Image (spheres, rainbow, N blue to C red):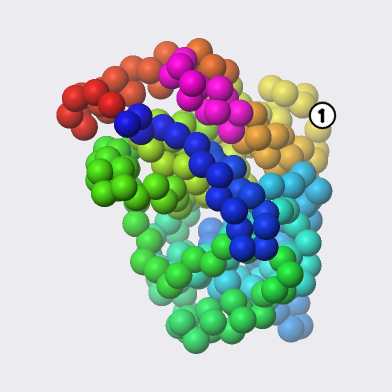
C-alpha cells in the first residue's frame, strides 16, 4: 500500500474533513504581548482578526490561550472556519518549540498553572453547535519522515486507517515531506512568522521587498503575507491531491525535483518500495 494518501472524515456534526488538511495554527508562545488593565493580549489575536475571512476550512487554537484570555473568546473563534482544532495547551507550558521559533521563552512560564482541570473548563465551554476537534492533554514531540513512514506501515499492517496528524509541521517543505511519508494533517506556526515563497519559508521583510515593493509599510507586509500564506496552503493541498493518482512530482509547483530525491532516499532508509 502506498504511503501518501487522502481521506474523508465525517465530523459528528456533519462537516466532512478532506485530507490532506493543512491547518493554520495560533499560539501566544514566542510572540509579543500587550498589557491591558485586565489581561495580557497576544499579538496573534491581531493576526487572527486579519486572516479570519480567509480561514474558510480549518484552524488550530490553544485552550491555554483562551483560558488566559490571550486571544479571542470561544464564542468569536467558533465563527471562524468550518472546523476548529483546540490544542490541549501542553505546548505553551512545555520546553518544546515549533520549528520556526526565533527565541525561546523561559520554561516553565513564571506563575503558570495548567492542568487537565483548566483544559476541561475550556472544552466544556465550546459551543456545541460548532464543529471542533479536541486534542488530549499531551507532551510535545517532533516526529521525522522516517518515523512517520514506519508508523504508517505499522498502522496499515494492522488495518488501521486513522490519519496521522503531525503537530508543528506547517511549512511548504516539511508538510510535503511528511505527506509523502504518510501523514495527512499538518499544523504549525510557521505561517505566522515567515512568508511562503517559491516553496520555502522566507523572512517576512525579504518577501515584502521582493513581492510588494520597498514602499510597503511593515504592518501591511505582515497582513498581506498572512493572507497570501493561507492561499499558498490551499494551493499546496491541491498539489498534494494531484500528486496522488500517479505519484507525479511535477504536480508540485515548487521543489518537485528535491521532493523526488528526498522521497527516494526516504524509501531506501525505510526499507524497500511502497
Quadrant of the rendered image containing residue 36: bottom right
Front residue of 169 and 185: 185
Residue 239 included in the magenta stretch of the image: yes
Residue occupied by mark 1: 215
Relative to 56, 86 lies left or right: left
Residue at image x 29%, y 20%?
264
Residue at image x 31%, y 47%?
159
Quadrant of the rendered image containing residue 152: top left
Dominant secondary structure of the residues highlighted in magenta in the image: helix
The answer to whether residue 233 of the structure is visible from this angle is yes
Residue 14 included in the magenta stretch of the image: no
- The answer to whether residue 162 is above or below residue 40 is above
Percent position (x, y) of residue 205?
Answer: 66, 34
Percent position (x, y) of residue 70?
Answer: 66, 71
Quadrant in which the C terminus is drawn: top left
Q: Residue furthest bottom?
A: 117
Front residue of 133 and 88: 133
- The answer to whether residue 195 is above or below residue 64 is above
Tell me how many marks there are. Answer: 1
Region of the chain picked out in magenta, as a range: 236-249
Quadrant in which the N terminus is drawn: top left
Q: Residue furthest front?
A: 159
Front residue of 258 and 131: 131
Percent position (x, y) of residue 265?
Answer: 26, 23
What secondary structure is marked by label 1? Answer: loop
- The answer to whether residue 252 is above or below residue 83 is above
Percent position (x, y) of residue 65?
Answer: 60, 71
How packed is label 1: few (under 14 Cα within 10 Å), some, or many (20 or more)?
Answer: few
The answer to whether residue 102 of the structure is visible from this angle is no
Quadrant of the rendered image containing residue 220: top right
Residue at image x 54%, y 67%?
134
Amino acid at each position: 500500500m502506498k504511503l501518501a494518501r487522502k481521506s474523508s472524515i465525517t465530523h459528528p456534526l456533519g462537516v466532512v474533513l478532506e485530507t490532506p488538511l493543512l491547518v493554520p495554527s495560533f499560539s501566544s508562545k514566542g510572540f509579543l504581548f500587550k498589557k491591558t488593565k485586565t489581561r495580557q493580549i497576544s499579538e496573534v489575536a491581531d493576526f487572527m482578526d486579519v486572516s479570519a475571512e480567509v480561514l474558510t476550512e480549518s484552524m488550530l487554537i490553544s485552550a491555554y490561550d483562551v483560558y488566559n484570555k490571550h486571544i479571542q473568546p470561544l464564542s468569536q473563534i467558533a465563527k471562524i472556519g468550518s472546523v476548529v482544532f483546540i490544542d490541549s495547551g501542553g505546548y505553551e507550558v512545555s520546553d518544546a518549540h515549533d520549528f520556526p521559533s526565533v527565541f525561546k521563552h523561559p520554561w516553565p512560564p513564571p506563575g503558570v498553572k495548567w492542568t487537565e482541570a483548566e483544559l476541561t473548563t475550556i472544552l466544556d465551554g465550546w459551543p456545541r453547535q460548532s464543529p471542533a476537534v479536541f486534542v488530549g492533554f499531551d507532551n510535545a514531540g517532533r516526529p521525522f519522515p522516517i518515523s512517520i513512514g514506519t508508523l504508517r506501515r505499522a498502522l496499515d499492517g494492522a488495518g488501521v486507517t486513522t490519519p496521522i496528524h503531525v503537530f508543528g509541521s506547517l511549512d511548504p517543505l516539511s508538510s510535503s515531506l511528511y505527506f509523502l511519508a504518510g501523514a495527512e494533517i499538518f499544523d504549525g506556526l510557521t505561517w505566522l512568522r515567515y512568508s511562503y515563497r517559491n516553496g520555502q519559508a522566507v523572512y517576512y521583510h525579504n518577501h515584502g521587498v521582493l513581492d510588494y515593493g520597498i514602499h510597503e509599510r511593515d504592518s501591511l507586509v505582515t497582513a498581506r503575507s498572512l493572507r497570501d500564506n493561507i492561499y499558498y496552503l490551499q494551493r499546496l493541498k491541491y498539489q498534494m491531491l494531484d500528486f496522488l493518482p500517479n505519484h507525479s512530482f511535477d504536480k508540485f509547483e515548487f521543489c518537485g525535483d528535491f521532493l523526488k530525491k528526498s522521497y527516494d532516499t526516504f524509501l531506501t532508509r525505510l526499507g524497500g518500495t511502497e
